Image (cartoon, rainbow, N blue to C red):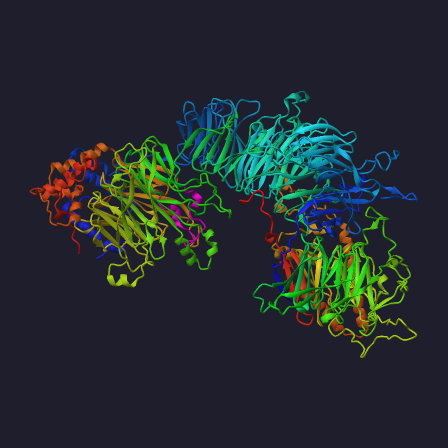
Amino acid sequence: MDIHRSRFIPYQPSAINALAFSHTEPDNNREDPTCLRLAIGRANGNIEIWNPARGAWLQESVFTGGKDRSVEGLAWIQEPDERDGQGITLPGRLRLFSIGYSSSVTEWNLATGLPSQHSSGNHSEIWCFAAQPKLKTSTKETRVDSRDNQQNLIAGCADGSLVLLSTAEGELRFDRFLSRLTTKRARVLSVTYKDRNTVLAGFADSTIRVFDTRNNNVLRNISLGSGPPGGPKDILIWKVRCFPNGDFVSGDSTGDIRIYDGKNYSQMQRISGHEADVLDLVVSQDGNMIFSGGLDRRTCFYSCKKTGDSRSNRGEKWREVSHKRYHDHDVKAIAIYEGNKLNFIVSGGIDTQPIVVPLREFGKELSRGLPTFPSNPPLVSAPKARLIVSWWNCEVRIWRVKNQQEATERPKVVARLALKGDENITSVAITHDGQLLAVATVREVKLFHLTHSEAHDRSALRIRKLDMPPTKGAKIVRFTADGKWLAIITPTNHVQLARATRSGGTAGRPRILPQLFPLQRLNRSDAQRDSLNGSWGLYNRSIHHAEFSTDGAVFAVVDLAGYIDTWVIQGHDDATALEVNIFDSSSSASAEDELSDDEDTPSKERITMFGQQWIRNPSGHLLPRLDSSAVLISFQPTPAGSTPSEPNGNPAVHQTRQNPHPHSHDIPHAEHHLLVVSAEHHLYHFEVIAGRLSQWSRKNTPASYPSQFRMIDDPAKGCVWDVNETYQRIWLYGEKWLFMFDLSRDLPLQGPSEATCQRKNTDKTSKKRKRDPIKENSKKTNSGAGGAVPESEAPVTKMRRYNGGKGDESAKSNWIDVSGTMGSKTDEEYEDQQHALVELRRSSSLINALAKGHHVSEMESHNVSKDNVNQKGRGHEGWWHTFKYRPILGMVPIAGNHQSLEVVLVERPSWDLDLPPRFTGSHE
Amino acid sequence: MKYAGGTSLNGTTPQISSNRKKNRSGKGKLPVSEVKQEEANRCNDENAVGAVKSAGTPSTSSAVHGLSKNKKRQRARSSAAWTMSAPIGGWFIPQDPVFPSNEKHLFIANKREVQIYSTETSLLTGTLPVGSGILSSFALSTTKADRIYVASSEGIITLWDWARKSKIARWDIGTNIRYITVVTQPSSAQDLVYCHEFGKHPVINVHALRTKDQDSQTELKMILKAKSPIIGFQVLLEGKLVIVACNDSVLVGKRTKLQKTALQDFEYIWREFRTSKSVTAIDAYVRLPDPSRKGKGQSQDPRDNLDLAIGCQDGVICLFEDILSTFSRLEKNSKTGNQAGVDLEGLRPKQLHWHREAVRSIKWSRDGNYLISGGNETVIVIWQLSTGKQQHLPHLTAAIENIVVSPTGTSYSVSLANNSVVILSTTELNAKTNVIGVQSRRLDREQLPRDFTSSDYSFAIFGQVPMVVDPKTPSHVLFAVPSSQPRQQHLGIQEPEPYIQTFNIATQRPISRQAMTRNNATDPNIGPERTRILEPNLKHLKTSYDGKWLATVDEWIPPPGDMGYLEEGVSYFNEEERSFRREIYLKFWSWNAKNATWALESRIDAPHLFENVGASARILDLAFDPNGLRFATVGEDRYVRIWIPKTRTRNGVTVRGGDKDSTGGLVTWSLDRSIEFSSKLDVFDSNSSSPVSLAPRNARLGYSSDGSVLAVGVSWPSHSDSGVIHLIDVETGRIQRSITEIDMTALSCLGILGRHLVVVADSIIVWDLVVDELVYCVPFDAPGVDRLQRIPLIRLAINDNDATFAVAYPQFEKNDTSKSRSARNYKKASTRLLIFDPYQSLIRWSATLPEIVLSLVPSRDGKGYIALDSSSSIRLISPRASSLQLITPPELTGQNTPEQEPKIEQSDKREEANETNVSIDILAREELLQDSENDKPVVRPEQLQDIFDKGPSHALPPVRDLFSAVVDLYARKPKASTRLSVA
């Protein structure tokens, strides 16, 4: 495989402006909520929803924004729980709100990723907002009115006014002004609820004001005095946060944090941990920890002395423990979640990478950088035309990559597109020959015809817009390789196919048939009800991956719940058939909703296009639901020549009198292999037509994956197939890794001893930070941040105690390991079971082979090959990996199918990003 | 023929001796080439005997004769001729300075003595000399305020009454004591001395040292035997807590059985914890319980709230709060096997990170609210712990080594890496007291080549320290000093020396320090690549004869790391590119008496230049004219350049400085003439060889004492050419004579003493310029150094006043245990110092100094020499009793016995000039007395005129010089008598 390691794509990830967790702590100290989500608001208007479950940190969906729609703040609220008719408590719905540079608050529909409503009011721009804390339902008998239990919003405006917004009854509307400061007109920079009725607001005139929301009274003005000499007079209070006991803490533009008593609103302590403005800070629920981040790139950690006696010294019990620069640029936002297992803070800023820092395990676990780039690589290629396409915001760029031999110059931009309108692009698709380009936003899908322009510059492409049937926009568009079918996944998770034809139109221009072919997904009845999924919408069912098979005969989508839906094409392509043949014209657009569960009658409406129609895969229901969300689906290319040649002549069924709407019922015979990678790094290799797992997948369970692969904590982003007669290689990649698996051979089984050997080997070979074996074992039990801190970096490693003097016991006394090892037996047991299963499956296949009369030598060779594995290392093991490339934006094939595989691997290192100049520390 | 060192000399020396035998009575043995030390000493004595005898004092002669038999008393005699003073200066030991409780004094120790300074005046008020051995530590008694314990590395602890400067007691412990600290023994009024002793293992012992008048016994109790070297330890609460810092672990010892106070009951429970970073500094603080809650029960072992601050190698300060209770919690947990609930709050230290480099010293303030730390950044950081605020005191003159908070907390004592101690007030951070030692280059024992092969190790760190004696005040010596010399930072890199320090050797006090080049005192000293920015290095330093002008040469070359962008892979090219970027300045400074500083008058950029590549050529030597305002430089570009001052005029009017009340105008120095010397004597060769490639290996300048002749010795890197000495007529700038007869391949020093040219190469060669022949040649051997590597290590000083010259060369004592031949494992380095007379190949006096002499200059005010060595000590070497010398001053005898045959045979101006200033030699006079009584010197009037009409009256040399010149005229020895028969 030839890799073009390239950095020419100026993809610009967007700065993180806001972070918010849907829950700050588990309800009533139970398990971590399954609905825990992190919303990341970016400067380009995108909101990303991340699922931190089990430390996987999966980017589940991206709500695209648009130009000048920066997300400046995010807040979640949860509706009060409801009881349905059977007396079952239904969890309340989660609602997500955002603010931008405007006077309105936007609510987002989590299922569709579209804004659902905006608030409006006669006030100026909103600078900050906060959600009212939930009512603590300590006493159950007080059945409070749902309106009283509502979490309202409070917003601080640029003119110094505070606005209460009501979220009652699923709405979002202006309630009243809490205060109108007309005299100073100082901006409200931060606002928070001290309790349900008290609001603390930090202003730009070095004052914190305390309001009672019930009667609009100002309870207290807390002045921070004037700024340090030489600087501006006013201190900007960038953030106010409250401890559970009512004390509160502020971070301001002098770099200080100040801690106040909640009862008498007096300042208790002032700690200067930053060299420049503190932009955000969070406090832990137990009130013992403060984290702050600011302009000087630091994340500071403060802790509280627990012992009461030292408090007698002064009233000062807080101290800065340490600070660290996790970020390359300003830290703009921090969010905290403190659960039983998962507990971490997440910080983000202009350097665009979210960093997860352990909370309770601070100092014992490493921080972890989450992927900077979208989980769906913004990169597609037209291998036959050697074009690669990348997009960001409203812009698409197309490069042509020269051959390896002539690739002395860097790839040239051959086309640029900037979409009209201010919506960000959600998805782009291009055909293999590079002629058709589909660009989707949440408003519309646009189709372009790319031709070589012979006019002046040979290298430039000529772009013509093609007419599309009206769509409601799309979040995913996909072309088949031959460009005949275009799949459109709408934001409302409807699947539509459009048929493109090359003939017909003027001057040989392709044309899109005006009729869209709707596909229905299976209705899964077992969808659970939780705070995200309910009568208001099913977040879990939102599709986030879709793929055609390479011959264009099978189409598969997968949703967040892990359901796979597949469709196959029926009939044969017949240019002589009617373009569009609808033979149940009574249908309306709403027909899609009338789904029946009967599989044989997928729809009342039957459409064929050129004699073809899509039907649900007959065995599609056999495909199981995945254990976790899929992060990648991809069809294995059928080896060349194995595609069934079309019967000679015209296979289509022609219209006869008996059959006014003829269509073939042939469905593809050849097996199509679909590879699905889950967030847990399981590789599912399905035989789609048969509706079962492939032999490889059955024989290679996750327990037999190489430990290097299991150790990876970044989800997979994409893959490239390299298939020929001798091997079936798949090159999987995540943001920091590249793995090859050969699906034509089994992975070596690793006994426990072997596995440790391997670990040792990796420890020796890997130049990067050594990973302790503990980490792998306790991956599922850790706090959700990085692995354990290696012993060499911990400040204190071990200690012991002995008596000195003559009876010197120093030799006898044992060292106590301070860090303490945490092993989980359950994992090992599970692995052992898996090993047994795999061995059983493999041996059974061998026995079968023997039974069929194969030579005994094969068994021997099997053994021999196993030995080889041990001796020669990974080259023969059917897998290979490297961590050399990072961070990987994407990897796409660039040569045609029949040549040796040639890929472009695009890196976008952080130092290459075009960040604004740093505020402080420019001398470093 | 050539007079080279070594074997060729063996042929010539007997000739000299035979020649001399003829003239003398044949008494005594004459030195042969391989002069052993003992013999040299004896010869020396005999020489002295001879000198005394020739003076015609029979009484002393007989006494001397008797003495010469006794070897022991011979030595006494030899020291009678010349003496070496006790060393002046020297570095302070790295221990914290100590305040007595009243803070009126400050105790600082160097390796020989404890010095007591007054904090009011910064003056030395007394010393407590340790006597033998090296002082390693000292501590004040806690029971009696005027007692001080002083420990030496030989294991001797002495107790002093420092107020009366009297020794009270002395104990011999017999181990290598590294550090001591003293606490009061509980429930008694007596001291306990905690000693860190180093034998096989580092050990901490507690000694109860008792004198006879005390009732109890001297006792010893070992409390800790450590596995790894101990960096330091601290004893708190009268021995209840002992904190020991090792390199990678910290031990906290808590005394058990607190009720029992006998020494043998001192048992400690040690809690040791490993740190991942290496510890460089440590300080502990015990927070005593709140006195307001005293009623709760003070007697029942109050929990000691111990806070521990640890400075690490990477600049982080780790702060462990209340660490003892954390330990006990952890132990409880481990005992119960409850691993999960371990609360690591206490072992999660608070990290204070400002320092970029290792934290060298850290101290708690007295109230425990602040930490004071310092390191190589030359910044004191004061951490306010509750607010996290830092206060910085930047721009201290050098890296910080030790910080001490005074007992009352009103001042900090900070010892810096430039051998100075500053006392700062805590409130305003003003310097109240400033104690400065000799700051010149220090070479630690560790810097001796140890693990290096000969090719790797550079002896450049032993190169010469530029040093001069101020002619205005002969007790002032000026020498170049580095800005900072932190300990634990060595390995062969020579610190640049951008400053000069003026030190008064009479009062043993520093006078001033002045920067001579750009420096980093107020600039950032770390570049963007996190490498240190190096200052230019002062290479040469000379004053004019009147002391009003100072010429310096400084040199800067980019460090190899900054040349990375030009990396071509070939190290030779990299070095060449680097040398093209060398910056060399010749600066002329005038003495500003009002400010008592040197003021820069002229700066000459690239005084020597490789024209074809435009790169600065290094200046190999700088010399001043002993008679006129004239400096000469010789450079790699094969030019000798002579620089003279010119009064600046504008349109014919003298430009005067703004504040100058003096008569002279502004003066600029400029090039007078440059004299090129070709790389080869033969014309053919010079055509063939390319000029650039043949830069001289070394070149030395020597002015004759009348300033008329400038000798340039040049040695070439090629072995085929053994080098040459050109004699240049200063007036005409022509090379008058080129001496090629001397093998100068390893030329290290050169000078003119009277009529003799002294060359130190492979051997010490004295050449008579008048008769143009060899006087003698004495080989010497510097063990442990190669012939070429020793070139920069040899010092030569010429004293015109007593007509002697001194040669110092290093002696490296190899470690015989190392088997490999290539690895130089040196144990010891010392210097051999020889004092010669130009007329005789006898060694007048010799001595061995325990350190490497980095600079050797003649003293100005009279006879003798001043040596500066690698421990920054200054030693004066002077002839013992001036009365003894006065018996035979050359002037007096010369006048009494006028020469009879002053043959002025040659009209050569050079020789004439030499003759006028030739000093009289005793030996020559002996001859004269015997066989040339009739000779009368014929003094021509123009010769007298030469002496007196040299210039305006203010430019005349001192009367003494005039007088000796006149005497020389009349008391010249006849030429023929000293002519050696050269085969």
Query: Residue A537 versus residue A450: which sits nearer the camera?
Result: A450
Locate the C terminus of chain B and report the quarter of the image it occupies. bottom left
Is the residue B221 above or below the residue A92 in the image?
above
Q: Residue B73 placed where, x, y %? A: 27, 36
Q: What stretch is highlighted in magenta?
A: B442-464
Within the magenta stretch, is there residue B599? no
Q: Residue B105 placed where, x, y %? A: 45, 25
Residue A315 placement: quadrant: top right
The answer to whether B37 appears left or right of A469 in the picture is: left
Q: Can residue A886 be seen in this view?
A: yes
Find the residue positioned furthest to the top.
B295
Residue B467 placement: quadrant: top left
Locate the N terminus of chain B and report the quarter of the image it occupies. bottom left
The answer to whether A876 appears left or right of B850 in the picture is: right
Query: Residue B600 versus residue B394: which sits nearer the camera?
Result: B600
Query: Residue A573 versus residue B340: which sits nearer the camera?
Result: A573
**Total marks drawn?**
0
Residue A31 placement: quadrant: top right
Q: Residue B436 placed where, x, y %? A: 41, 33
